[in-house]
Image: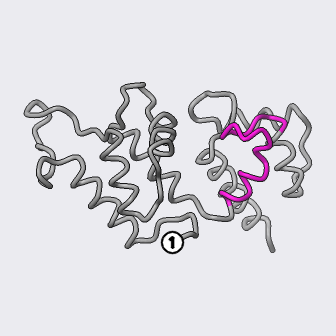
Amino acid sequence: DSSGTLDLEEFSRLALALWKALGSNGAPPASDPSAAEPPVLGVSELRAALRDLDIDCAEGGVTTVLARYDKDSSGRLDLREFSLLASELSVSHAVRTAFSTFDRDRSGALSTRELRAALQTLKVDATDSQAAAVLREFDADGSGALSLLEFAQLCHRLVSLRAEAAP
């Protein structure tokens, strides 16, 4: 659906698509790591998995998705890289919309300046140095900016802190 999150049925379809794409003739990959190459998704397998989720990905779109999540630049997604993609697909629509709003330069990540503006919108008054400290705390990959998933984790923390502070 267009909610920006995966429900159980959609996640099941994604897992099944991954299972089919990574296995030989639909069979799961060998359980003995020495018996076969680690499972990976290339462009055609990734396109099929996304299509099974009703996510429209033309050739350029699949290539863009692959480039963004292919951390080892192999031209394919391994299971760890695909897990990151699946995690980001599961981020709520509200968080995804907020992230897009604050990502002014459309880089796909929030800089300290963009994060400070986001915090101010959320009624959190932060100086540049405080915003930089928050960014460092949630910047799990050390990129110097917050990805969508890192921003989602920050939002969840803020919601938790506000719930704890409520009477």
The figure's colour scheme reads: one colour
Q: Which residue is mark 1?
A: 1
SS label for mark 1: loop
Q: In the visual, does 140 lie left or right of 128?
A: left
Quadrant of the rendered image containing residue 66: top left
Q: Position of residue 68 (x, y in %)?
A: 52, 36
Q: Nearer the viewer, residue 93 or 129?
A: 93
Q: Nearer the viewer, residue 138 or 29?
A: 29
Please tell me which residue is depicted at 37% across the width and 50% down the height of the picture: 47
User: Where does the magenta region start and end?
Assistant: 95-113
- Farthest residue, direction front: 59
Q: In the visual, does 69 lie left or right of 155?
A: left
Q: Is residue 109 magenta?
A: yes
Please tell me which residue is depicted at 87% across the width and 46% down the height of the picture: 117
Q: Nearer the viewer, residue 55 or 68?
A: 55
| Residue type, mark 1 in image | Asp
Q: Nearer the viewer, residue 110 or 162?
A: 110
